[in-house]
Amino acid sequence: MKRCAPAVLKTYSYKRGIWNTGVPDHIRRLLRDKSTSPLCSQDERSLVSFFMARGAIPLKPAGTALTNRATTAVTTNSVTTTFERHYLIKYLYRHQAYGNVIKIAQSFLYTTIGSRKLLRQDVSLPELKKFLLSLVILQRGIQLDQAMSGVISQYLLTQKTMVVDLINSVFTKMVAMNMHEEAVYKWVKWMKLVNGHCEFTNYMENRLILRTFLSFMRQSSIRPDYLSYLKDIQLTQGPALASQFATTLILLLTYTRRFNLAEDIWNYKCEHNLPIISSDLTCILKTYCHMQRFSMVPQTYYKYPNAQHDQNQFDYLLVAHSKLRDWNALQQQFNDLFGIGKLPSIQHYGILMYTMARIGELDSVNKLYTQLLRRGMIPTYVVLQSLLYAHYKVGDFSACFTHFELFKKYDIPPSTATHTIMLKVYRGLNDLDGALRVLKRLSGDPSVEITESHFSLLIQMCSKSTNHLIAQELFDLMTDYYNIQHTGKSTAALMDVYIESDKATEAIVLFEKYSKNLSWRDGLILIFNKLIKAYISLQNTDKCEEVFRKITDLNLAVDSEFYKMMIKFSVTLNKDYDTAMSILNQLIKHPVVKVDAAHFEIIMEAYDKISYRDGIIDLYQLMSDNKVTANSKILYFILKAVAKKSLQNSEEVKETLKMIEDIMENAANGTLDVTYNKLHPSVMAWPMRMVVKHDSPQRALELYNRYNELFFKKHDWVSNNNKFVMMRSLLVLLAQIGQWKDFETLFTKYVDRIENIENLPSSTTPNIKLKSLFSGLLPYKINQLAAMNKIDELPLLWKKLQKKGFILDNISWNSAVDALFKDSRTISYGMKIVDDTLIHGYNLIHKFRLLTKLSQDTTRSSDKSWPTLELKEREPYKFQPRLYLQSETYRSIVKYLDTYLNGIEDLTTLEDQIRDFISNYKYFMKDYLLKPRDNINNWERIELRHSSYFKELRKFKRILPASKF
């Protein structure tokens, strides 16, 4: 992904140098001084006089190429060698003897060929830099110009990269000395000599030239007066160069998101009638869109027809048209063209198609595209962009790839915005590897500007896979290699990845590291929002309130995400639903920030957890009253609430089914106000499972088929069926109707899909969001194994899932041990699970039940305290096991064990088996043997033969070693 850096001349290795025998000892002693303090005047004079008197080795220039190695051969005792010259210049520069650096350099670095004075062929880059920097330090501007002009004319054709490096080094030194105006003046002048102009319109293509100047612009301690620089350059170097430099400034200022300053430079060009080129127009349109001054975009665009050569301009033009939201007027204007006899041009088609695409009118976009093709028109960039965006908007991702290929077919280069849409397509498909391939392809195309938005999209995608390592690498690549300044957008995206990866503390560290260098213009509120989210995940109420106060103190303009965090804080940490509703009602009336489905979704999810169905229905009504567009998650909650209410009231599910079908039909027809016309599978998955359990598996299958017919083409059914949520629903359906062979096939496909995701190149860290994929599903798998007499396969599957860290819920554990105990082939493994994992929670629960019962008995508790119960009341979660053997399961496995042992007829064999169980599963067997096993033949003889063991066990209720049995 990274490009190779250009080769630079190596620094001369002084350790290999040989001192001339003609250099006296007192001079050598002076030169051994490794300090940086200034030399005394006498030592400096004697040192320079000695070497000036000796002169340099005469060389006949063999060419004009600069070399990084110099000969160390000593030809005579009376001249200064190349090594000595290297060392002397470095020594004088280190001791701040800049005047003598210049003196030595002018005498020793140059040679005269005819009437021309040229640099010698053995001059090294470090020597040349120290000579030029000494001129800067002593502010000898005329000499500096002469020296730099000589370097440019001599080495431009053969060593351009080195020349640019020298210019940027001198520029950096002048900036460090606060010579900002002169530094800019000379940089512009010299870059014109190097390139023939100073007009740069693409940062990535000219990165080596511009990165030092860009760093100067980004220094927070410097406030460059760009207008003053322009005025001086126009007065001294002419309007042509001033116009070129203004173009470069506009590019870099929009690149660094300093849009107010970019507008100032644009206004300067307009006021002084300087030429407006394509890059200028693109940047100002981008600026107006960022400032949300959308009416200025078409007005400015149409004013400069000669500068309309950049396809990116259409992105901003069409965004502005759609943001102005005058759809009817736009459509009417288009239709009127037919009535007045003037057929619409390709530009008319493009504008209308894009505005239709933004509101999800896919059919209208396709009809317009077909119409223009029938008229023999050749699609333009804006037409193809509209077509691509329309399919993305409705979630038809497979079609996006087809329409993206049209750019190649019509030989139209895709723009930055085109690639942004394709990255969003990969995000919709949750395909991080595909998105990374897009970025790699873009990095090799100098015509495409890679922006922070591209990286933010990629980083945000890592949230779904909880891959913080790749997210951090992308962030570092953006800032270090592409030299893109991070703002709140990319920093917030990276923080979110850490939060979703259960690393909230690392997200807080990121905030502390980057917040100091961001202002409100850079999206500071975005990372404050993520900071609140991090503290919510850590359940730190005090810190959340502290952040809210800080935002108020800084007087930051809050956004939609901020209100989401306030609502989430109220319902998650404070369980204060009234406050959350109050915030929501305030937001509905907010003059600037618009309420959306995400704000309602947070409260609905909280209501769903506490089974407050009426509250969910009331919230949906509130959304309808305020014309808030619903999303798939909202529809999921409302369907679930209505269905649960119907079941609670012992009503049939027919009404719920009717509601589900209506929602599907209306969403597909575009008559339902939803964010995406294609409903997320989760909206159908839960109703399917509900219908399977409470109505008819056949009805559930019909619902599933209808969903596919409405939202997916035939060839898309396979991709839709690969979604985990749909596969889970189908597995439940197959289990309910007992089609175990099909269930087994689909379950294998389910496991394979998980393993394929885990083996992707981008899966460098475990995806913690995949860990719950088997919760609620394993009881059906266990039933399938039992039904097909394959329960002996369960231990291997169980070990595999545990090893990979999948969450196995308590119901699954109990279902597993029940099935394992039932089969004589696997009863030992079942006992191991119970003994290792479940029996402890079972005993703890029953212990507290007994203590509670005893504490309520007045005859026993009148003079006793119950410290264990008091401790449980103070810390309830500490004494509430996550995994435990359910009472019903316990009774079942005890019964199965009785049956198993009853099948052993030989008394000695039976005793050996019990002894073996006691040795390997001591906790469970202690509980099992507390009561006589009356269902086992010959148990009375067992009791007699081991009476002392049973007596001690049942008296003290402690584990006894198998050797005592």
Image (tube, helix red, strand yellow):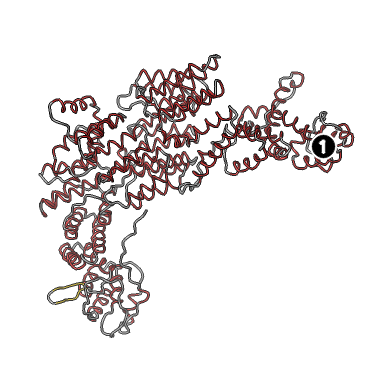
Mark 1 burial class by Cα count in 10 Å: few <14, some 14-19, many 20+: some
The amino acid at mark 1 is Ile
- Which residue occupies the foreground of this view, 10 or 96? 10
Looking at the picture, tell me which residue is in the foreground, 552 or 295.
295
Q: Which residue is mark 1?
A: 904
Percent x, y for residue 585?
38, 21
Q: Is residue 878 visible?
A: no
Residue for point 54% across, 24% down: 697
Q: Position of residue 240 (x, y in %)?
A: 11, 51
Q: Work out whether 27 lies above or below 443.
A: below
- Residue 291, image x and y in percent? 25, 35
Please name the residue shown 34% across and 40% down the image. Answer: 402
* Count of numbered tags: 1
Q: On the rendered structure, is 164 left or right of 425? A: left
Q: Is residue 738 above or below residue 133?
A: above
Q: Is residue 51 left or right of residue 836?
A: left
